[in-house]
Image: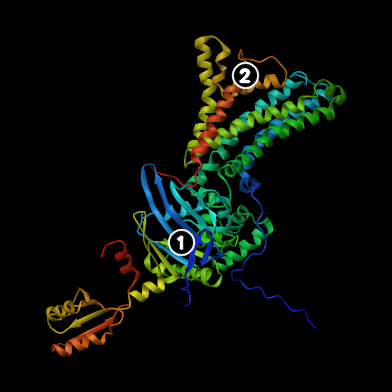
Amino acid sequence: MPEQATIHDQTYRHWNGSLRSSTMRWWTISWAGIKLIVQRKLLLLLVLGPPTIHFVAQGIRIYAFHLLRFAPLGPINPVLFHNFLLGQSFFLVIFCVFVGSGLIARDLRDHALQFYLSKPITRLDYVLGKMGIVLVFLSLITLLPGLLLFLLELAFGDAGDFLSRYYWLPGSIIAFSFLLTIPTGLLILALSSLTHNGRYAAIGFAAIGIFSPVVYEILHGIFRTTRVAFVSLWANMEQIGALLFDFSPRYQLHWGWSLLTLSLWMGVSIWILRRRIQGIEVVE
Amino acid sequence: MQDSLIVISFRLGYNTITLNRNQYHITRNPPMVIELEDLSIYYGVQQVLKNISFQVESKAVGMLGPNGAGKTTLIRTLLGFLKPTQGWGSVLGLDISTRQSEIRQRIGYMPENDCFVSGMNAVTFVAYAGELCGLPHSDAIQRAHEVLQYVGLGEARYRVLDTYSTGMKQRLKLAQALVHDPELVLLDEPTNGMDPPGRLRMLDLIRDISYDKGIHTILSSHLLPDVEYVCQEVIVIHQGRVVMQSEMAELKQNTQKRFDVKVRGPHERFTHILDEYGYEWRPLKDEILRIALPENISPRVFFEIAVRNNMQIRYLRRMEHSLEDIFAQAVGET
């Protein structure tokens, strides 16, 4: 007897499963955002291409130092990893300007916040979801290549000697990567939440990224001291980076002040996000 | 002599307590779909919802009111976007102030504005909505296909949302509200910007959801025919207050005893007699009179009056009142 075919109707059917709890819904937002960015191949090339080239160049430097005995740029030590990660911060700016700036602004423009917040997710889930997108890409620019460089050093150099001297280096790479990515991510999301047009957020971010070092230079010129470095976003990061990678800092500024300044940046960003991410926009 | 039987029954929370002399009996009632008690909302110093109290238990309820009446604010309060400044409310038996997440998991919301995630296609978007509500990924994808087929977007489901027409966007918003199989859907102006055939299709969908699929529906609209077409019950909101709540059938019944009548010649004599009988009337255009008759009086009375007073009835039509009249009456614009 022939097997009977199942008849599928195309009407609405009730669903009999049980809905999952809400603990990881922020990741659903992150994952959807990541997939949308990955679909835009040209953009991906723009934001991930240059940092990959920078990483490859550093890899070649390590290879040349150990296997070709060619070291025009000095020895392989923690400073190299610090400078590599600090150099990658330029590409963080590129990512934030081209991608991060639109993450919340586009949702505000398209009224998508209503869509998100009418689902069983909280405002915190939403922000964490967007932060997840930023952190994944920023980690691809900082954390991942930083750790890969470390592995390259172990692979090409004297792994036992390097590990015994710098066993703390992976921890420093991870900590410094987060130090670069979390304040930057929060800042770009806060700026993005202030406008319906991502371009304004991008301009705002570029202004902070470029002008805060300029303000430092001006103040340095006036007061003749590097203690005023706390006004520069990147100088503060560099200052804490020196502590993490165990070398003399460039500025006469206690790392505590730098940490406090970065905390303030993050605090203000979180405050803005709390104010701006609402289910409704009330026009007073 | 037999003792007189006194039974007192009252509702306390979700329980009905019946007292019968020295005995009492507690019956657990199913929770109301929506229950609001003395609910007020302020935007700054402006009170936008004023001491609203009502209960909803039927399948399809229309929330009527002109633009700015407070319908959307009320929906947003039910969703937990706004905290009541005063009063209390529950949706599906869950407190709107403390259990917003559970409420949102069990309801679907179709907002008035377009709200999409640009760059996605319809299947991705609807599945995404399902996953945010807690559907597992594979189920979300399957449901997205089914629901899009159901709302009539099956052919266009792989198109990027930014290319959708207004009507398609409206149907897509309905699909994302239905994907997780909610118990209640809140539809805010679902036919906005749609052409007449599209509007009718949307209203048919809403009727089907409500009557055949058993999903409670709250339809907020300023379009009276939409509510009339879909709903069993209507709540009229005006200037932040509930000015009327009634079953649709009851409303219709109350309006069936109105007649449009035209007599030959000047109608003054006829209206004078109507006044004597105590019947309400008002003149319309072309010498037509709209007359309200009490429930027990037949329209035959018009002919009796005409015969007795040597007049002629030239036109008689029983009025099928639209909600428009009722709405105008409720908000005091008659």
Residue placed under numbered mark 1 in the picture: B55
- Residue B332: percent from left, percent from top: 28, 62
In front: mark 1 or mark 2? Answer: 1
Q: Chain of mark 2?
A: A
Disc number for residue A233: none
Determine the CA span between mark 1 and mark 2: 59 Å
Q: Quadrant of residue B23?
A: bottom right
Q: Quadrant of the C terminus of chain B?
A: bottom left
Q: Is residue B304 visible?
A: yes
Q: Is residue B324 above or below residue A87?
A: below
Q: Chain of mark 1?
A: B
Residue drawn at x 33%, y 78% as measured from the top left = B256
Observer-nearest of B257 and A36: B257
Observer-nearest of A235 and A57: A235
Q: Secondary structure at mark 2?
A: helix
Residue drawn at x 30%, y 82% as measured from the top left = B296
Q: Secondary structure at mark 1?
A: strand
Q: Is residue B285 above or below residue A156?
A: below
- Residue B105: percent from left, percent from top: 58, 55
Q: Quadrant of residue B313?
A: bottom left
Q: Is residue B118 visible?
A: no
Q: Residues within 10 Å of mark 1 (few under 14, many from 20)?
A: some
Q: Is residue A87 above or below residue B106?
A: above
Relative side of A159 to A45, left or right: right
- Residue B230: percent from left, percent from top: 45, 70
Observer-nearest of B284 and A50: B284
- Residue A230: percent from left, percent from top: 56, 19
Q: Residues within 10 Å of mark 2 (few under 14, many from 20)?
A: few
Observer-nearest of A251 and A25: A25
Residue placed under numbered mark 2 in the picture: A256
